[in-house]
Each structure stands twice: as C-alpha cells, then as structure tokens.
Image (cartoon, rainbow, N blue to C red):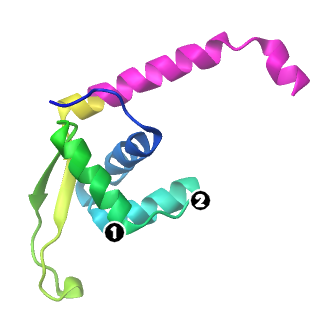
Amino acid sequence: MKGTNLGEFEELVLLTVGILYEDAYGLAITDELEKQTGRRSSISSVHKVLVRLEDKGYLKSHMGGETESRGGRKKRLYTLTAAGVKVLSDTREVRNAMWGRVPKIVWESG
C-alpha cells in the first residue's frame, strides 16, 4: 500500500464513495461532490483520484452490469475497503481533536 496521508480532495472523494455506497461510479461521484461541496470537479480529476485511492488500498472497484441508459456499457463501481474506512475514521479523529483544541476566544473574536 502506498502513502497513508490523504489530501483534501482524496478525503472528499472517499467520503463521497461512502455516501453513494453501492452506486459510486465516476459521474455519480462527480455530481455528488458538487452537490455536497458546491465545487465543480472534472470527471478526469475524479478518475485520477479514484485510481490513486485504489492504488493506496482505500478503494476497490468492479465492473457493474450493462444499462440501457449507458447504451449497454458497463460502469466501474467503487467501494470503500477496510483500510479506506480506517483512514477516514483516523482523519476524522485528528480533525475533531484539533477543532476541539481551538480556544473559544478564537470563535468569539472572529
């Protein structure tokens, strides 16, 4: 497994795969990312991250069935691995701990 650090976009893509659960494929992930974050992402940037996350062992993929809406083409579906769930959990713990350490005065003065 390659590096264990997650970039922000990698984290968002992993979270989106979790949100979509059994229907996580490239275009659906791209659309859900925009819906959740308000940021547009190109399908190619999402695909690059999906490949990188699969290489790191955080995702696994398989080809789904053919659909009429796709002209009989199959789509590659992604699911979180145990390592993917763990890295998201670890990331959340670190972020929550850090958020909890920001003094209240920071929020009151801002």
Left or right: residue 106 versus residue 87 is: right
Q: Tell me: residue 31, above or below residue 19.
A: below
Q: Tell me: residue 96, above or below residue 85.
A: above
Q: Position of residue 59 (x, y in %)?
A: 20, 43
* Residue at point 21%, 53% (across, down): 78
Can you tell which mark lies on residue 65?
none
- Nearest the camera: 4 or 61? 4
Q: Main secondary structure of the magenta part?
A: helix
88 is within the stretch colored magenta: yes
Asked whether residue 50 is in view, the answer is yes
Crowd tier of the residue under label 2, counting other residues whose Cα lies within 10 Å: few below 14, some 14–19, many 20 or above = few
Q: Look at the numbered disc 2 and give the secondary structure of its residue.
A: loop
- Comes first in the chain, label 1 or label 2: 1
* Residue at point 9%, 71% (across, down): 65
Question: Mark 1 and mark 2: span between their CA atoms?
Answer: 16 Å
Q: Tell me: residue 50, above or below residue 93.
A: below
Residue that badge 1 annotates: 27
Q: Amino acid under label 1?
A: Leu
Rendering quarter of residue 106: top right
1 is within the stretch colored magenta: no
Q: Position of residue 36 (x, y in %)?
A: 53, 54
Q: Tell me: residue 17, above or below residue 66.
A: above
Q: Look at the numbered disc 1 and give the secondary structure of its residue.
A: helix
Crowd tier of the residue under label 1, counting other residues whose Cα lies within 10 Å: few below 14, some 14–19, many 20 or above = some
Left or right: residue 104 versus residue 25 is: right
* Residue at point 52%, 22% (across, down): 95
* Residue at point 70%, 14% (across, down): 102
Q: Position of residue 105 (x, y in %)?
A: 84, 14
Q: Amino acid under label 2?
A: Gly
Rendering quarter of residue 47: bottom left
Residue that badge 2 annotates: 38
Q: Which residues are magenta?
A: 86-110
